[in-house]
Amino acid sequence: MRLSEDQLRRYHRHIILPEVGEEGQHKLLQAKVLVVGAGGLASAAGYYLAAAGVGTIALVDDDTVDLSNLQRQIVHSTETIGQPKVLSAKKTLETLNPDVTVVPLQQRLSGQNIHELIKSYDIIVDCSDNFPTRFLVNDSCVAVRKPLVTGAVVKFEGQVLVVVPGEGPCYRCLFEAPPPHDAFPAHEDGVLGALPGVIGSLQATEVFKLILSVGETLKGHLLIYDALKVLFRKVRVPINPHCTTCGQ
Amino acid sequence: MNLTVNGDTFITEVSTVADLLKELAIDPVRVAVEVNLSIIKKAEYASYNLKDGDTVEMVNFVGGG
């Protein structure tokens, strides 16, 4: 398939990169990525995935847009308050780039539906906002062998980890099990507005490298961003032989 | 003894991972701990003895999106 004149122009700054080229841009256009969540991380990740021409982007979220989301969830807007987040985001992303099809999945992920949902996608991007979902997504990606780009934020700290089942550690190798419910009270849920922008953009960058097979990814490394100290730290994560998800 | 904790030199007299977390006022349920590139199970924090020169990484649980 040849790129159209419009596409050659839209993706020009990609195409002139030797690591991307027309062939790489074609890979991006053919790629199918599923994003879990449609909040702060998904706003940034979704924006850049769509702008780059990732052809199919599924968004899974059962929530509606609330005024308190707009301090950081930039894919939504004042006029979409009250609408399902997946529809609000679909409108924004498809307006940005008509090459992209956004599949709005207005539902909550569960052990019952997750395998079926993720199996037709190439890469899963975890932008969820809670630990049970993070472990569910990780375990399911390992079970059906899908690459996972997981990101998280709270207060002034963000993290990114890439899980390639069979090739490196998984999220559970490091974190073992969800923390007790009362370990993180709601009043500690503050997050600096631009932080999910930084982390979601890093997640999109990892997705591009996985699709294009270029460079090194955060497979086996947890990247930690401390916004207050302006510090990035890359922590090597070993495969945990005792991991109940991917261990022996 | 001298440890490297999250990339920085740290001098301490504690003996176990649990003691180190206590000294640093870190709630053990809120972190994952690696020593010399091995993940330490939470159940072993109190029994895992640190030794001079160990490299310790403590990673916060971060769950928001």
Image (cartoon, coloured by chain):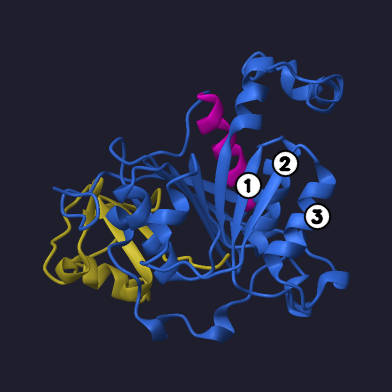
Secondary structure at badge 1 equals strand
Category of crowding for the residue at label 3, using alpha-carbon neighbours closer than 10 angstroms: few (below 14), some (14–19), many (at least 20)? some
* Position above or below: A70 against B3: below
- Circle 3: residue type: Thr
Labelled disc at residue A57: 1
| Colour given to chain A in the rendered image | blue
Instruction: From the image, tell me which residue sits under label 2.
Output: A100
Q: CA distance from mark 1 to mark 2?
A: 7 Å
The overriding secondary structure of the stretch rendered in magenta is helix
Q: Are labels 3 and 1 assigned to the same chain? A: yes
Q: Is residue A203 magenta?
A: yes
* Position above or below: A117 against A163: below
Which quadrant of the view contains residue A145?
top left
**Residue A173, image x, y percentages:** 28, 53
Is the residue under label 1 in contact with that under label 3 (CB below 8 Å)? Answer: no
Category of crowding for the residue at label 1, using alpha-carbon neighbours closer than 10 angstroms: few (below 14), some (14–19), many (at least 20)? many
Category of crowding for the residue at label 2, using alpha-carbon neighbours closer than 10 angstroms: few (below 14), some (14–19), many (at least 20)? many
Q: Which residues are magenta?
A: A200-213
Instruction: From the image, tell me which residue sits under label 3.
Output: A92
Q: Are labels 1 and 2 assigned to the same chain? A: yes
